[in-house]
Image (spheres, rainbow, N blue to C red):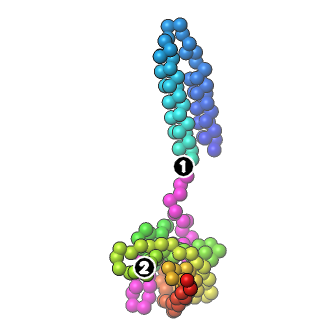
Amino acid sequence: MKALIKSLLILAKFLITFFLKATKNDKITSHEQFYLYMKKTFYLGFAILFFSVLYSCKKTDNQLPVPEGLEGVWSNRVVENSFVKFDRTTTLPKDDYAIAFQENQVLVERKNAGWCGTPPITYGNFQGSWTENDSIIKITVDNWSGLADYEWKIISITENHLYILPLSENYRTTGD
């Protein structure tokens, strides 16, 4: 914040000096005065635009902090026998399945957004909720046709990997 204030003060000092500098001279024609006015206006506009862009940019790359435990983003799903392995990542992938267990039992599942499973598949984010009791995760989440209920058993969870055993999947369609 101090750097922002210091930069704005430097900019203000520059602009005051630049605009208050006498440009009226008996030897300057009205065309030259217009040119100087336009030049100053251009520099002022550029300075305002530059500092606006520079100080309005915030880091918003959808990266979540890597917490311990179940909370976080899990993607790169691989089915091994009856078990499912996920890798912990920091963002939801654009074109692949992933699930994000967030604070306050908020869940985001990135999955097929339509009924057709033939490529090209369109992925979408679906909101839901989750609870964990002992090593059982219960999930309720929206999908393209209604609601889905999952029940998973956590087999193993480390800093980088989650192994689960799917116990049940139930889908409820909503009426039109």
Q: Is residue 132 left or right of residue 165?
A: right
Q: Is residue 33 above or below residue 92?
A: above
Q: Nearer the viewer, residue 20 or 167?
A: 20
Q: Which residue is mark 1?
A: 57
Q: Which residue is mark 2?
A: 77
Q: Is residue 75 visible?
A: no
Magenta residues span 57-85
What is the x, y in percent for residue 129? 60, 79
Quarter of the image where the C terminus is located: bottom right
Marks 2,1: beta carbons within 8 A: no
Q: Residue furthest left?
A: 119
Residue 113 lies in magenta, yes or no? no
Q: Secondary structure at mark 1?
A: loop
What is the x, y in percent for residue 126? 53, 75
The residue at the point 61 percent across, 84 percent down is 132
Residue 68 lies in magenta, yes or no? yes
Q: Nearer the viewer, residue 145 or 98?
A: 145
Q: Is residue 109 visible?
A: yes
Badge 2: residue crowd in 10 Å (few <14, some 14–19, many ≥20): some
The residue at the point 43 percent across, 81 percent down is 115
Q: Secondary structure at mark 2?
A: strand
